[in-house]
Amino acid sequence: PVAAGLVVLAAVWAGPLARASATSFAAHMAVHMGLVTVVAPLVAIGIAGSRYDPTPRHPLLFGPLPASLVELLVVWGWHAPLLHGWARTSSTGHILEQGGFLAAGLLVWIACLGRGARGPRGQSLLGTLGLLLTSIHMTLLGALIAFAGRPLYTHALSGLHGTDIDPLAVIADQQFGGIIMLVMGGAAYLAGGVVLMARMFRQTGETAS
């Protein structure tokens, strides 16, 4: 899974989607979701329970609920108009944004799967809650963007190359990006939470028997 995650990472950052993200909000969102819902969980699954799993050694740094809060701050922060505009128009901002998304995604998935997948029932419960809370805030932000009736990011109205573009096209692209977050972000973390919950119930049944 780690190797697969690195392959996806290379495709996301160096493939056609990355080039399209220079002018398309939806493509930019797809890059974000590729990092946090594909690359990060693949890497986390690969190291969960292995000698490279940092959660047994650093439980406070990799608590599922604090990790979910960190990702909320990163995701919502970089989708605030000011920071998002900086990331779309500045190389430094873009690098910090992409790195922040990848780091936050890895933090959440490693925190939830590392201790939750292999640990006692209490840790499975915390991992489940961490992923479900992340699913909720991803779904909420995606819905806010998808149902916005006006451009949320004013830099998009003049284009990235100084040419005026159709506001309706900007709104449609923005709404499609919101749908991508709503579907990919909400579904991936929800699925992870359901898997951990099922594992927790199975552990409970094995203990009872």
Image (cartoon, rainbow, N blue to C red):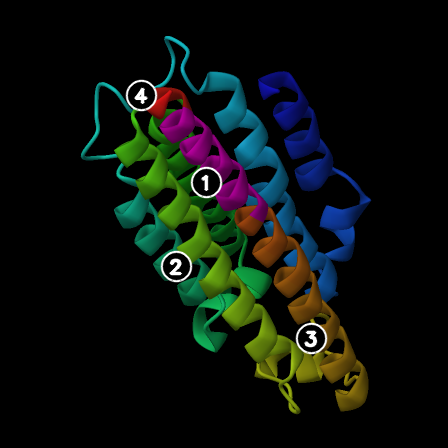
Residue tagged by mark 1? 197
Main SS of the magenta part reads helix
- Tell me the amino acid under the disc marked 2: Leu
Residue tagged by mark 4? 54
Query: What is the span of residues highlighted in magenta in the rendered image?
Result: 191-205
Query: Tag 2: Cα neighbours inside 10 Å, few (<14), some, or many (≥20)?
Result: some
Q: Earlier in the sequence, mark 4 or mark 2?
A: 4
Question: What SS does tag 1 mark?
Answer: helix
Is residue 20 shown to the viewer in this render?
yes
Between the residue at mark 2 and the residue at mark 3, the CA separation in whole angstroms equals 20 Å
Q: Earlier in the sequence, mark 1 or mark 3?
A: 3
Q: Position of residue 13 (x, y in %)?
A: 66, 39
Residue found at x 66% / y 91%: 149
Residue tagged by mark 2? 72
Q: On residue 174, which mark appears?
A: 3
Question: What SS does tag 4 mark?
Answer: loop
Query: Tag 3: Cα neighbours inside 10 Å, few (<14), some, or many (≥20)?
Result: many
Relative side of 93 to 26, left or right:
left
* Residue 204 painted magenta: yes
Question: What SS does tag 2 mark?
Answer: helix
* Residue 194 painted magenta: yes
Residue found at x 26% / y 39%: 63
Query: Tag 4: Cα neighbours inside 10 Å, few (<14), some, or many (≥20)?
Result: some
Tell me the quarter of the picture where residue 77 sits. Answer: bottom left
